[in-house]
Image (cartoon, helix red, strand yellow):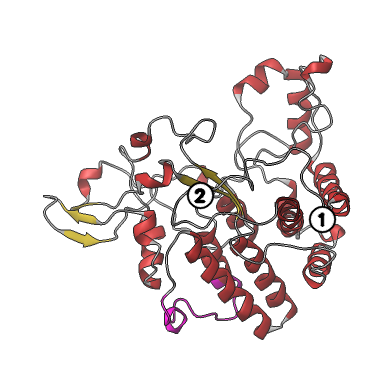
Amino acid sequence: AFGDVPMDEAARGDEQIFRPKFNKQQDIYPKLLNDLDSANKLFKPSRAMIYGTDILYGYKINSSLSVPTSPVVQAWQRFCNSLNMRLLLRVSKRTELNSFARIRAIAADPVKYPVFTSNTDAAILSLTGITPLVSPWGRAIDFTLRRAAGKFFLDGLNALNDPRRPRFATEASNKAATMKIGYKGIPSGYTGSENQFDYLPSILQIGLVTAPMIVPIMPYAEVEFIKAELELKSGTSAAAIIAYEKGVKAAIEQWGAVIPFDYFTNVNAAYNNTLERIMLQKYYALFFVDFQQWFEQRRTGFPVLPPGPGMLNNKQVPSRFEYPLPVRTNNPVNYAEAVSWMGGDEIFIKVWWEK
């Protein structure tokens, strides 16, 4: 999200390191990948967790949403290897890391490298509403005030006749709020007042941020879409179709919806042997998964997002966040060094894995 960040000296305040040095991205990613490889060898699924339970895989909520129930140690090992696949794909433009061969090695050996195989395995934090598992949104109403769902987001779901729509958004209505008109958002980056629209747009469901709720960290569907992209690159269409359809089905069912039996007969949903089709469904699968939609859109260019007239940055999707003000003011020397490495601190500076 930022580019170069502290790693070796991060979170070492107890050692009186309050102004940590930054590490370069090209050094951070190989270390993360090596750490995940090493961690995979340390898991002993036959042994109980030393600390008993944990908030990711040890808690459940009484809800219609799918939540993790796997044995805890094995669940963490699956998360470890699935995360390894995500990071390898993220840096796949950097050919020196041989990402696709390493992803294939993981996917081809589920005994040595177990990964997510169902929504039950997924890394999804379940928030019950009981301390400490409370919603990070202090006031859920703030999530919906003066906000609207995006036109591109809902138009795509409408084209798919997707059953997740009522989970994600409310229906729009006419200006008088007397008649529902289906799921209809407004264009991102528009200029002028919202009064220019002759309808009251859909808004995101307040239930998304109201406990009991889920916070997806890494969904199972993501693993299947990684496999689909791998098979597309390898030219194995049959395997790509299987992974693609598994990913779509998992992404829909994760939100408690049921995939229609004829979903893939829709020309907009059927696999068409393109990365764009995979990435559109992955875009929806990564809804509410931190910044993963943004990262993947930057990596692939898909889905192609329409720029609004009010969009800044030369109508380009930003490549990174600027460093926060406290970093600039409290750690100026190391901040300046990192900026010099990257060539600037602007939002259009591409991070290492994008180049």
Q: Upstream in the sequence, badge 1 or badge 2?
A: 1
The residue depicted at 11 percent of the width and 50 percent of the height is 176
Callout 1 secondary element = loop
Main SS class of the magenta portion in the image: loop
Image point 73% across, 25% down: which residue? 335
Mark 1 or 2: in front is 1
- Circle on res. 288: 2
The amino acid at mark 2 is Phe
Q: Is residue 134 above or below residue 105?
A: above
Q: Position of residue 206 (x, y in %)?
A: 35, 44
> Does residue 26 appear in this view?
yes
18 above or below 189?
above
Residue 108 vertical placement versus 59 (above, below): below
Residue denoted by label 1? 46
Quadrant location of the N terminus in the rendered image: top right
**3D distance between C-alphas at marks 1 and 2:** 33 Å
Q: Which residues are magenta?
A: 260-277
Q: Residue at x 63, y 45 (%)?
A: 56
* Residue 261 magenta-highlighted: yes
